[in-house]
Image (cartoon, rainbow, N blue to C red):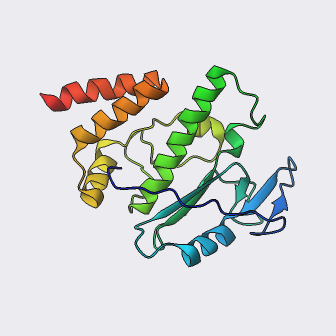
């Protein structure tokens, strides 16, 4: 996102904290996103534009809901997202599964942080900001913004798109995200003309 970032200390998750429950369908441990978001607002550093938290514990936003991948509260500039649904078997991942976990994690991270920059769900193009209600739908999303949401991100952060894409290209090369790297390669050539 072309803005400075800092790593904060881990938040302890004591048993029963943050509206903890067991998912009625699969028995997974879950945290209530609204309870976590309230704590994040309370603990947010004064100099932070936004704070995001990552967890391997599943999330739910309301007792009537099954789960969510993440939830952002743009008005308070906080968001939480879980990778629990991306690695249900825990640490026993093949290299291909590890790459898939990384891709999915980057997608949900980009999506939720996009909300913190004031970008709503995209209804115009195939975009990282499209809404997703299940894993298969989420897997169909690209990791990048469409032109409409890229312009919104540029307006919010003042980023140079070509510089952003070059940085993302280097990360994709480092992490072996070949599909996204190929898309970035083509966009960089197109923008550099």
The residue that appears at 37% across and 46% down in the rendered structure is 124
Above or below: residue 88 compared with residue 25:
above
The residue that appears at 70% across and 48% down in the rendered structure is 56
Residue 11: which quarter of the image? Answer: bottom right
Tell me, yes or no, if residue 130 can be seen here: no
Q: How many numbered marks does the figure carry?
A: 0
The residue that appears at 84% across and 64% down in the rendered structure is 15
Residue 13: which quarter of the image? Answer: bottom right
Tell me, yes or no, if residue 186 can be seen here: yes
Residue 84 as seen in the image, left or right of residue 147: right
Residue 70 as seen in the image, left or right of residue 84: left
Above or below: residue 131 compared with residue 37:
above
Above or below: residue 100 compared with residue 81:
above
Residue 139 as seen in the image, left or right of residue 127: right
Tell me where residue 128 appears, x and y as whole percent: 45, 43
Residue nearest the viewer, comparing 130 with 75: 75
In which quadrant will I find the C terminus?
top left
Residue 190 as seen in the image, left or right of residue 174: left
The residue that appears at 54% across and 46% down in the rendered structure is 108
Tell me where residue 49 appears, x and y as whole percent: 40, 67
Residue nearest the viewer, comparing 164 with 74: 164
């Amino acid at each position: 996102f072309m803005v400075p970032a800092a790593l904060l200390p881990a938040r302890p998750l004591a048993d029963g904290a943050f509206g903890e429950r067991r998912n009625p369908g699969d028995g997974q441990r879950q945290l209530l996103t609204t309870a976590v978001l309230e704590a994040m607002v309370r603990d947010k550093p004064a100099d932070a534009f936004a704070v995001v938290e990552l967890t391997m514990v599943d999330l739910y936003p309301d007792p009537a809901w099954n789960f969510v991948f993440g939830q952002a509260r743009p008005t308070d500039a906080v968001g939480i997202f879980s990778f629990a649904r991306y690695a249900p078997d825990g640490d026993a991942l093949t290299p291909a599964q590890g790459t898939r976990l990384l891709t999915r994690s980057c997608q949900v991270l980009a999506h939720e942080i996009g909300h913190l920059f004031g970008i709503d769900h995209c209804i115009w193009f195939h975009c990282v900001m499209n809404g997703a209600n299940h894993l298969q739908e989420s897997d169909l999303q690209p990791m990048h913004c469409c032109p409409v949401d890229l312009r919104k991100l540029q307006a919010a952060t003042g980023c140079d798109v070509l510089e952003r894409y070059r940085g993302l290209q280097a990360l994709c090369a480092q992490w072996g995200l070949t599909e996204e790297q190929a898309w970035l390669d083509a966009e960089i050539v197109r923008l550099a003309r």
